Image (cartoon, helix red, strand yellow):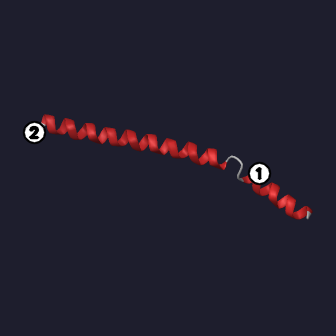
Amino acid sequence: MKTAVLIKEIYLEGFRNLGHFILKNYLKIFAWFSFLLIVVGLYALLFRIFTGFAFD
């Protein structure tokens, strides 16, 4: 029984802050991805303006 409690404690300690770590990295990746999409959109708009695209 003592071994089962010890394994449970090791498991809980190992995964205690894992959710925060995953969420923090997910938001960081999402922010960079959003910034990259804005830069690509801005590039496409400026390319169309400088090449004389008619926005009719």
Q: Quadrant of residue 36?
A: top left
Helix or strand or loop: what does disc 1 sit on? helix
Rendered location of residue 32, percent (x, y): 43, 41
Helix or strand or loop: what does disc 2 sit on? loop
Residue furthest right as drawn: 2
Q: Quadrant of residue 53?
A: top left
Residue at image coords 73%, 53%: 14
How far is the residue under mark 1 from the one under mark 2? Answer: 59 Å
- Residue count near mark 2 (Cα–Cα under 10 Å), binned few <14, some 14–19, many ≥20: few
Q: In which quadrant will I find the N terminus?
A: bottom right
The three-letter code of the residue at mark 2 reads Phe
Residue at image coords 48%, 45%: 29
The three-letter code of the residue at mark 1 reads Glu
Rendered location of residue 11, percent (x, y): 76, 57
Rendered location of residue 28, percent (x, y): 50, 41
Q: Is residue 32 left or right of residue 19?
A: left
Q: Which residue is mark 1?
A: 13
Count the marks: 2
- Residue count near mark 1 (Cα–Cα under 10 Å), binned few <14, some 14–19, many ≥20: few
Residue at image coords 41%, 44%: 33
Work out whether residue 46 or residue 15 is closer to the camera in this orientation and state it: 15
Rendered location of residue 6, percent (x, y): 86, 58
- Label at residue 48: none
Residue at image coords 22%, 41%: 44
- Using the image, determine if residue 12 lies above or below residue 47: below
Q: Is residue 32 left or right of residue 23?
A: left
Q: Which residue is mark 2?
A: 53
Identify the mark nearer the N-term, 1 or 2: 1
Q: In which quadrant will I find the C terminus?
A: top left
Work out whether residue 56 or residue 50 is closer to the camera in this orientation and state it: 56
Q: Is residue 20 left or right of residue 28?
A: right
